[in-house]
Image (cartoon, rainbow, N blue to C red):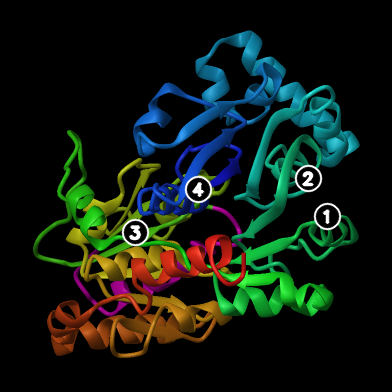
Amino acid sequence: MKKILLGINSLHIGGIQTALINLLQNLDYTKYDVTVQLFHYEEEYRGFLPPEVKIRKASFLLGIANNTMKEAKKKGTAIYVLRAAMAVICKIIGANRFYSLLFRGIHDDTFYDEAISFTNNGNIKTLYFGMNQYILNCVEARKKSTWLHVDFEGMKLNDSYNISEYRRFDRVITVSEAAKDIFLKYVPEMSAKTHVVYNVINPEKLKEQGNDRAIGFETFAQDRLKIVTICRLDENKNVTACLEVAQRLKDRKIPFQWIIVGDGTERNTLAERASEKRLDENVTFVGYQRNPYPYIMDADIAVSTSISESYGMSIAESIALHTPAIAFYYPALQEVIKNGKNGFIIGQGCTEDMANKIIALYESGELVEMKKRCCNLISANDAISQFDRVFDGEEA
């Protein structure tokens, strides 16, 4: 049985966190003895993981650093001020130096067969950082791997610091062939050490969650075309384009409701812009939802306007729930969407083309048939087989 450590900053739900939870819910625990290292731990996280999985908590200061500001505020003024001070220090000295200070004196004495950083660095001036450093410097293991969940170039990880850090790992795991190709453009010497393991998506589990309607769930109006977007509200997700598409639909007299699920730095700006465009009756921001799947199940179409992604988790989950997806092009999207089968790929930034495609689907009635044949191109079993091959098979 392989002893594996999987490290992630937090399980506050996002695409990477969902990917880890889905993976852990599908592993064969007769093969793997798994421990999850968390920098930030909340009691509710225990319920997300299978009982076979052990949890290793971090130091008090690492925990504070990996709270969101919203979480820190709930824990009192002292924690909030400390978290804010840490963010300022990161901006001044850089996250790599800041985490080096926090890691002093920390060492995991357990020896693992595999130690895996399941997350990648964020901006070097922010606190979303450090797990790669931790696995490389504070853990003993036969082999060390890191997961790359983003477009290495698009997310500006192609700098000297990150490239030198990735070179120190025995393996790099990407979540798509496209993400692998982009990474190897900058680190070609890692070709033999770079592998693809797709995100695990379990349609049955998603349906179970999709049928779990919380009190206060914002339902769609039944007499309109129902559109959903689920993403972090930041510059890369490009939700401004959703509002431009919504404006075109409204101008063409299409009856629709567009629910946008997620939170982020641009939420207030986007809500104000929607009001300025007089889209309040058509576009609804419901904020962060731990369980977004009822919105997907109720929608006719899922839309993504991301500029870059390494895979497209929310799109793949939508397709798993038989909700066709329409998205702006990025290289990995061709591994998620097959035009006409489970959705459509639109030229990057072409809001007019996206609006025209939505209108055509609505007016033709094609959505009904597309929902019936909508399915993922990669199954959960395919993804688990890839994991086994890398960590317990021919590539181990």
Q: Earlier in the sequence, mark 2 or mark 3?
A: 2
Q: Are marks 1 and 3 in contact (CB under 8 Å)?
A: no
Q: Secondary structure at mark 3?
A: loop
Q: Amino acid at mark 4?
A: Met
Q: Which mark is residue 1?
A: 4
Q: Earlier in the sequence, mark 3 or mark 4?
A: 4
Is residue 249 in the magenta section? yes
Q: Earlier in the sequence, mark 1 or mark 2?
A: 2
Q: Which residue is mark 2?
A: 136
- Image coordinates for residue 269, horizontal then vertical, percent: 53, 49
Is residue 3 in the magenta section? no
Instruction: Identify which residue is drawn at 71% across, 28% down.
Output: 109
Lateral position of residue 304 relative to residue 156, left or right: left
Q: Amino acid at mark 3?
A: Leu
Camera-side residue of 91 and 281: 91
Instruction: Identify which residue is drawn at 80% across, 66% down.
Output: 158
- Image coordinates for residue 182, horizontal then vertical, percent: 70, 77
Camera-side residue of 362 and 177: 177
Q: Which residue is mark 3?
A: 279
Instruction: Identify which residue is drawn at 26% across, 76% down.
Output: 375
Q: Amino acid at mark 2?
A: Leu
Q: Quadrant of residue 133?
A: top right
- Whole-angstrom CA distance, mark 1 to mark 2, is 9 Å
Q: Are marks 2 and 3 in contact (CB under 8 Å)?
A: no
Q: Is residue 207 above or below residue 330?
A: above
Q: Which mark is residue 165?
A: 1
Q: Earlier in the sequence, mark 1 or mark 4?
A: 4
Q: Is residue 243 visible?
A: no
